[in-house]
């Protein structure tokens, strides 16, 4: 039996490399967003009437549930029909694949876990609206009139309405006077998750990338020590 020399074993501390985190918690976070988004859309579609007749005030007139559908992107942005929708669905599929790979890539390179969580929020929101586009034309029969197919042409269900102002602008205002405006779009849980993920990255990018640089320095130190 051989024994290590006590001098050799205690002369220099061996730095342990940072463990690579598992991607599972972040994909579970994305899955939670998807589940909440799809459940909210199912409940709204099943139990609410579309438009003003089914509107439910939550906080006075400022925050409401308002069932509406849109064929476009997040927050009601729309691409030209009919094939703009198909293009959007294809883009979402690519985005979902790219974001999924990016989460794994970030963890392999020991990125800040808060940053990875933000990417998971964006992924969950992207998948939530993607499911609407692919399946809702069939499940809820809400494909636009004249759509080439019910598959991949489903419309996104929106319901969260922050009513900052809705009405006509003063006629005396140049260029926009007399126009009817609604200052905040109606959105859904998936849109909210995407917005929160992007906003947190913008607000906390200094902290996230400071942690990433520190992790890279630790990896470089581990490599040189080896």
Image: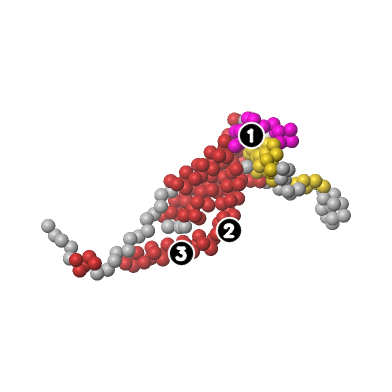
Q: Is residue 21 above or below residue 44?
A: below
| Quarter the C terminus occupies | bottom left
CA separation in Å, label 3 and label 1 = 45 Å
Determine the CA span between mark 3 and mark 2. Answer: 17 Å
Is mark 3 in CB contact (under 8 Å) with mark 2?
A: no
Side of 110 relative to 86 (left or right): left
Q: Is residue 33 visible?
A: yes
Query: Pointer 3: residues within 10 angstroms few (<14), some, or many (20+)?
Result: some
Q: Is residue 44 above or below residue 215?
A: above
- Which badge, 1 or 2, is on the more N-terminal residue? 1
How crowded pointer 1 is (Cα within 10 Å; few <14, some 14-19, many 20+) is rated as many
Residue drawn 53% across and 63% down?
Answer: 206
Is residue 79 in view from this perspective?
A: no
> What type of secondary structure mainly makes up the magenta span?
helix
Find disc 3 in the rendering and name its residue. 213
Q: Tell me what residue is drawn at x 49 percent, y 64 percent.
A: 210
The stretch of residues the image draws in magenta is 40-55
Query: Which residue occupies 57% across, 37% down?
Result: 38
Question: Residue 45 occupies which quadrant of the picture?
Answer: top right
To which residue does mark 1 refer?
A: 44
- In the structure shown, which secondary structural element does the residue marked by tag 2 occupy? helix
Q: Is residue 217 left or right of residue 40?
A: left
Q: Which mark is residue 202?
A: 2
Q: Give the mark nearer the N terminus: 3 vs 2.
A: 2
Contact, mark 1 vs mark 2 (Cβ under 8 Å) = no
């Amino acid at each position: 039996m051989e024994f290590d020399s006590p001098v050799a074993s205690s002369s220099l501390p061996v730095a342990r490399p940072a463990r690579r985190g598992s991607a599972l918690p972040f994909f579970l976070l994305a899955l939670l967003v998807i589940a909440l988004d799809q459940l909210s859309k199912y409940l709204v579609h099943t139990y609410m009437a579309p438009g003003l007749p089914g509107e439910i005030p939550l906080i006075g007139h400022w925050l409401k549930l308002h069932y509406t559908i849109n064929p476009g992107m997040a927050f009601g942005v729309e691409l030209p029909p009919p094939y703009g929708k198909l293009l959007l669905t294809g883009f979402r599929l690519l985005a979902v694949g790219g974001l999924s790979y990016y989460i794994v890539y970030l963890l392999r390179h020991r990125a800040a876990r808060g940053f990875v969580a933000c990417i998971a929020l964006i992924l969950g929101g992207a998948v939530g609206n993607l499911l609407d586009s692919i399946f809702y034309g069939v499940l809820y029969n809400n494909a636009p009139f004249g759509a080439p197919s019910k598959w991949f042409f489903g419309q996104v269900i929106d319901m969260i309405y922050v009513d900052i102002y809705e009405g006509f602008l003063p006629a005396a205002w140049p260029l926009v006077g007399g126009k009817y405006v609604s200052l905040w779009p109606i959105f859904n849980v998936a849109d909210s998750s995407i917005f929160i993920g992007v906003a947190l990255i913008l607000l906390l990018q200094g902290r996230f990338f400071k942690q990433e640089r520190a992790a890279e320095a630790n990896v470089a130190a581990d490599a040189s020590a080896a």
